[in-house]
Image: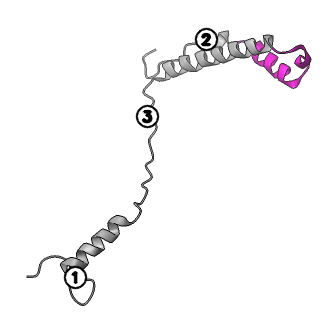
Amino acid sequence: MPRGRKPAGEQALSNAERQARYRARRMMEPVTVVTRLRRPADRRNRPQRWRDAVNELLVLQAGYAEWLTTLPEGLSDSRTAAALEAIVDLDLTDLAACEPPRGYGRD
């Protein structure tokens, strides 16, 4: 019973031909492999994600308030100033005071 692959041509390659083919393959540019990295799973529970989101909103609002106070006088009547005032005027204390339900009878 013969072993190995069947020859691609009429007869099997000689050792020199096989070595030449191997060297030619090694000289070719390697194929670039595209790896897609997965985003790590968010392991926080919903109440923790809620608190983190509210804290982020409060930090952003404080940053916008600082931006509004340092805005030049020439831009006090601009659309940027109006948008900053609208953000600063939002009352986020209700969001900060709200504690979402834990769910599934754990309240």
What range is drawn magenta here?
71-91
Looking at the rendered image, the disc whose residue lies closer to the viewer, 2 or 3, is 3
Residue 54: percent from the left, percent from the top? 60, 17
In the displayed structure, does residue 39 sit left or right of residue 54? left
State the residue position of label 1: 13
Query: At label 3, which amino acid type do we have?
Result: Pro
Between 87 and 5, the residue placed more toward the observer is 5
In the figure, 97 relative to 46: above or below? Answer: above
Marks 1 and 2 sit apart, C-alpha to C-alpha, by: 76 Å
Marks 2 and 3 sit apart, C-alpha to C-alpha, by: 27 Å
- In which image quadrant can residue 84 be found? top right
Q: Kindly identify the residue that appears in the image at 20 percent across and 81 percent down.
A: 14
Looking at the rendered image, the disc whose residue lies closer to the viewer, 1 or 2, is 1
State the residue position of label 3: 40
Labelled disc at residue 96: 2
CB atoms of marks 1 and 2 within 8 Å? no
